[in-house]
Image (cartoon, grey):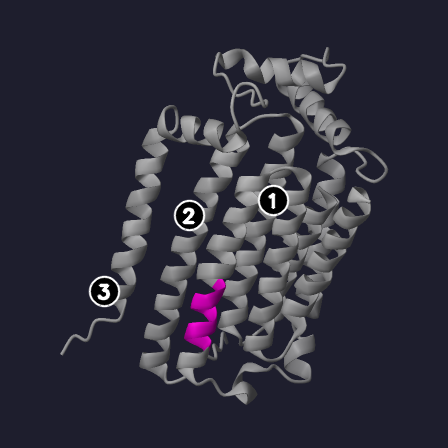
């Protein structure tokens, strides 16, 4: 449980602390999804229950879809702006 | 020996995660992301959650991070414009510190004290807290009571070596009780296939 919470915290901090790198934001989202799935898996394993693994299967497929759409948006953004650096001012 | 390996893999996952968010080059950070996934998958396989652990390696390492590497190498990024320097980097440190401390405060106020307890005790404490707040039920004394409380749905989710393998019970649940969610996940994956095509279509 501590491992998944620390990984989630790493994902949140990686999302917040970078200002320009949108690829690192997508990677941080992947780390957060991994941490949550890991927490669900450990909890369901400790209760000897199979539903957590079913749920983890769905979260893995949603994470794959999310990264595909995110990278598609990234490529479209690069073609529009000529750069992936983001400025939020 | 097994516990030592589990701790070693957990340490490797955390160190690789920190290196992911601190490295300057996106390619290096994706390589450390692969390291995080491999460490967590090894942890799960050693713990006994074999199928999902191997699925992690297949899906994340085989598909997602390769997709990341492909996009990063295709876009021909300029490293100088991605890296925040000096005041730009320290500008967000207070926000990060506030978010991290709020996160830890919420966890320590919602969860019972985590360190030094086994995971089952922690989850039992969480469930007892929630049930005593919502339902007024406080008679859970050990984990087996909670397990029986959740098992009242007459779904046979017990998997032992006599009643079938773990992957058999996953498949049985996936195609019977959870079939509608499987179809929904298929529709979402279809959406994930269509939307990059629509996004990258040339509208001239």
Rendered location of residue B58, percent (x, y): 48, 54
Q: Residue at x 74, y 26 (%)?
A: B125
Residue B17 locus on image (x, y percent): 66, 62
The one nearer the camera, B56 or B95, is B56
Residue drawn at (58%, 63%), measured in percent from left and top?
A: B34
SS at mark 3 in the image:
helix
Q: Which quarter of the picture shows residue B39? A: bottom right
* Image point (53%, 41%), residue name: B51
Q: Position of residue B129 (x, y in %)?
A: 71, 24
* Label number found at residue B20: none
Please tell me how crowded label 2 is: few (under 14), some (14-19), or many (20+) other residues with Cα within 10 Å.
some
The chain letter for the residue carrying disc 2 is A
Let me know if marks 2 and 1 both belong to one chain: yes
> Count the marks: how many?
3
According to the picture, the residue beneath numbered tag 3 turns out to be B198
Which stretch appears magenta?
B65-72
How far apart are the alpha carbons under marks 2 and 1? 14 Å
Instruction: Name the residue tied to disc 1.
Output: A38
Q: Identify the residue under disc 2.
A: A61
Q: Is residue B57 magenta?
A: no
Mark 3 crowd level (few <14, some 14–19, many ≥20, 10 Å Cα): few
Q: Would residue A40 be found to the left or right of residue A75 on screen?
A: right
**Element type where label 2 sits in the image:** helix
């Amino acid at each position: 449980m501590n491992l998944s919470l620390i990984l989630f915290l790493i994902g949140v901090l990686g999302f917040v602390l970078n200002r320009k790198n949108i690829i690192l934001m997508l990677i941080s989202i992947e780390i957060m999804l991994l941490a949550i799935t890991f927490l669900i898996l450990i909890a369901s394993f400790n209760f000897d229950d199979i539903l957590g693994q079913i749920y983890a299967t769905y979260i893995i497929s949603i994470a794959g879809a999310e990264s595909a759409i995110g990278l598609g948006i990234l490529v479209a953004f690069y073609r529009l702006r000529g750069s992936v650096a983001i400025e939020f001012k | 020996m097994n516990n030592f390996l589990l701790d070693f893999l957990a340490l490797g996952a955390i160190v690789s995660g920190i290196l992911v968010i601190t490295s300057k080059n996106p390619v290096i950070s994706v390589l450390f992301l692969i390291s995080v996934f491999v460490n967590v998958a090894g942890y799960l396989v050693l713990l006994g959650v074999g199928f999902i652990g191997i699925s992690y390696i297949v899906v994340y390492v085989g598909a997602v991070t390769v997709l990341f590497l492909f996009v990063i190498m295709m876009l021909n990024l300029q490293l100088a414009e991605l890296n925040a320097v000096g005041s730009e980097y320290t500008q967000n440190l207070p926000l990060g510190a506030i978010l991290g401390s709020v996160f830890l405060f919420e966890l320590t106020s919602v969860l019972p004290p985590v360190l030094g307890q086994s995971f089952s005790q922690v989850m039992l404490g969480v469930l007892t807290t929630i049930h005593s707040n919502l339902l007024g039920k406080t008679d859970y004394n050990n984990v087996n009571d909670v397990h029986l409380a959740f098992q009242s749905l007459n779904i046979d989710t017990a998997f032992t070596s006599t009643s079938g393998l773990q992957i058999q019970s996953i498949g049985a649940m996936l195609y019977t009780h959870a079939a509608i969610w499987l179809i929904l996940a298929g529709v979402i994956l279809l959406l994930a296939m269509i939307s990059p095509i629509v996004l990258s279509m040339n509208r001239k």
